[in-house]
Image: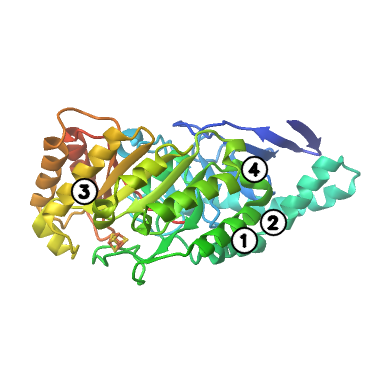
């Protein structure tokens, strides 16, 4: 790590952050980064020179442990820790991710309307103008190269880069699996299939396409292009999201091939962050159809694999109400299979989503509680249940109370699912 003082700005190159994802209530940098500290802000940059984080150091900043993070889709997320109590029991994290676009939160807070947050974002834009003349002052090579990299990544270029990412994979990701929180949502997206098997009425993230696997050639082309896309910052990733809404339906051979080739191509063995992870979504039918071959193929890989399945409800009337074209028996069989997989495979964790909404019938909640109690003889820590608030919900306080009631009765870890895109 090298630190330089330029006028009133402190620049730190190649700062080593944490080498594994942890659950903390304070800002943690993961992998390697570069920082610029001014009197008022701490700006973090990735190894490509793209702005990644901002933390206010002034007295206006909402809370000393809160920060902003920019995603690869060029969205800003505000990590709020100072406003709400017991966040961990709701989210499994010590922070509330406040998004700069509409989603399904159960909290009202919009930090992007806060003047101090707006000033911080504006300061990151002004900083480039302050840095530009400094390059002429006979700087050491490392630092002038770092400043060049930052100056190349102006807001227009960052927007273009997000578009380029979406071009490579075939479009934006409307929702990431809830389990990607374990990698701070820092995943490389890689599409193995498009569309989904169902087109449920309630779903706000579905694509119009019917389900279709990508070809091996398409996947290999994505891998090659993604490797170039992430370039010098690739070492700061250790996780892949195999998309899109039902990658599990792509079959064990395509999933296995993609996981193995992605691990090698992205050089995860040398990542700055340990414990590589693989994330994918599955549907009820794809889970029931997939044989042991998939789990036998994934379990020995160097990844810890999370498979998240949308079960939505264990109540037949609710399934009909939301137009989920699946019988109750299949939901129960899929839930049982999820429990079996979690017990049999050390490196695979299946999790399930259910709906939370103020227009859902009491039977939906009664059936859910019955399912997540009667199928288990005690509490198990593996295999979370995520409750996804419907966007149509109005009474957020009542939903939070409903969530607590379910969580208290659940024999699996139970959290809220806040939709994040990429
Ligand atoms: S909930 Fe899942 S299966 Fe249903 S439409 Fe949405 S993405 Fe497709």
Mark 2 and mark 3: Cα distance apart in space: 46 Å
Residue 353: x and y in percent read: 27, 49
> Which badge, 4 or 2, comes first in the chain's sequence?
4
Residue named by callout 1: 161
Look at the image and tell me whether residue 91 can be seen: no
The residue sitting at the right extreme is: 138
Residue found 37% across the figure and 58% down from its top: 250
Q: State the mark number for residue 334.
A: 3
Query: Mark 2 or mark 3: which comes first in sequence?
Result: 2
Label 4: which secondary element: strand
Asked if labels 4 and 3 touch by Cβ distance under 8 angstroms, the answer is no
Q: Which residue is mark 2?
A: 153
Of the two numbered discs 1 and 2 on the same chain, state the one appearing first in sequence: 2
105 to 37, vertically: above or below: below
Q: Is residue 47 left or right of residue 131?
A: left
Q: CA distance from mark 3 to mark 4?
A: 45 Å
Give the foreground label among 1 and 4.
1
Is residue 290 in view from this perspective?
A: yes
CB under 8 Å between discs 4 and 2: no
**Which x, y percent locates residue 362?**
9, 50
In the rendered view, would you say 379 is above or below 357?
Answer: above
Q: Quadrant of the N terminus?
A: top right
* Label 2 Cα crowd, 10 Å radius (few <14 / some 14-19 / many 20+): some
Badge 4: residue crowd in 10 Å (few <14, some 14–19, many ≥20): many
Crowd rating for badge 1 (residues with CA inside 10 Å; few <14, some 14–19, many 20+): some
Label 4, on which residue?
A: 43
Q: Say whether disc 1 or disc 4 marks the residue closer to the N-terminus.
A: 4
Name which residue lies at 17% across and 27% down.
378
Question: Is the CB of the residue bearing disc 1 within 8 angstroms of ligand 1?
Answer: no
Q: Is residue 57 shown left or right of residue 232?
A: left
| Residue beneath the point at 29% across and 49% down | 291
């Amino acid at each position: 790590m090298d630190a330089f003082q330029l006028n009133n700005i402190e620049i730190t190159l190649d700062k080593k952050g944490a080498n594994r994802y942890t659950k903390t209530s304070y800002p943690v940098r993961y992998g390697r980064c570069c920082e610029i500290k001014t009197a008022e802000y701490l700006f973090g940059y990735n190894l490509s020179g793209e702005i990644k984080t901002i933390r206010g150091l002034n007295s206006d900043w909402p809370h000393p442990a809160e920060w902003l993070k920019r995603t690869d889709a060029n969205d800003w997320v505000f990590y709020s820790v100072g406003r709400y109590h017991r966040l961990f029991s709701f989210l499994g994290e010590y922070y509330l991710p406040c998004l700069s676009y509409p989603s399904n939160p159960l909290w009202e807070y919009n930090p992007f309307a806060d003047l101090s947050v707006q000033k911080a974002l504006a300061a990151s834009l002004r900083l480039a103008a302050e840095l530009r003349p400094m390059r002429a002052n006979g700087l050491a090579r490392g630092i002038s190269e770092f400043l060049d990299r930052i100056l190349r990544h102006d807001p227009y270029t960052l927007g273009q880069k997000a578009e380029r990412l979406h071009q490579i994979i075939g479009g934006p990701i409307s929702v990431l699996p809830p389990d990607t929180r374990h990698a701070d949502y820092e995943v490389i997206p890689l599409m193995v299939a498009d569309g989904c098997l169902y087109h449920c009425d309630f779903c706000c993230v579905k694509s119009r396409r019917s389900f279709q696997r990508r070809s091996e050639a398409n996947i290999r082309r994505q891998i090659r292009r993604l490797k170039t896309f992430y370039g010098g910052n690739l070492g700061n990733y250790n996780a892949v999201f195999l998309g899109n809404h039902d990658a599990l339906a792509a079959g064990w051979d395509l999933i296995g091939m993609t996981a193995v080739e992605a691990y090698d191509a992205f050089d995860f063995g040398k990542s700055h962050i340990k414990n590589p992870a693989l994330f994918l979504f599955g549907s009820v039918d794809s889970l029931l159809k997939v044989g042991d071959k998939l789990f036998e193929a994934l379990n020995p890989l160097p990844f810890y694999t999370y498979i998240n399945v949308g079960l939505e409800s264990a109540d037949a009337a609710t399934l009909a109400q939301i137009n989920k074209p699946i019988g109750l028996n299949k939901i129960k069989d899929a839930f049982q299979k999820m429990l079996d997989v979690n017990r049999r495979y050390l490196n695979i964790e299946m999790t399930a989503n259910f709906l939370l909404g103020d227009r859902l019938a009491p039977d939906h909640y009664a059936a859910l509680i019955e399912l997540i109690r009667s199928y288990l003889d005690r509490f198990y820590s593996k295999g979370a249940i995520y409750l996804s608030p419907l966007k149509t919900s109005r009474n957020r306080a009542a939903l939070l109370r409903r969530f607590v009631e379910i969580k208290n009765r659940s024999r699996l870890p139970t959290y809220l699912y806040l939709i994040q895109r990429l």
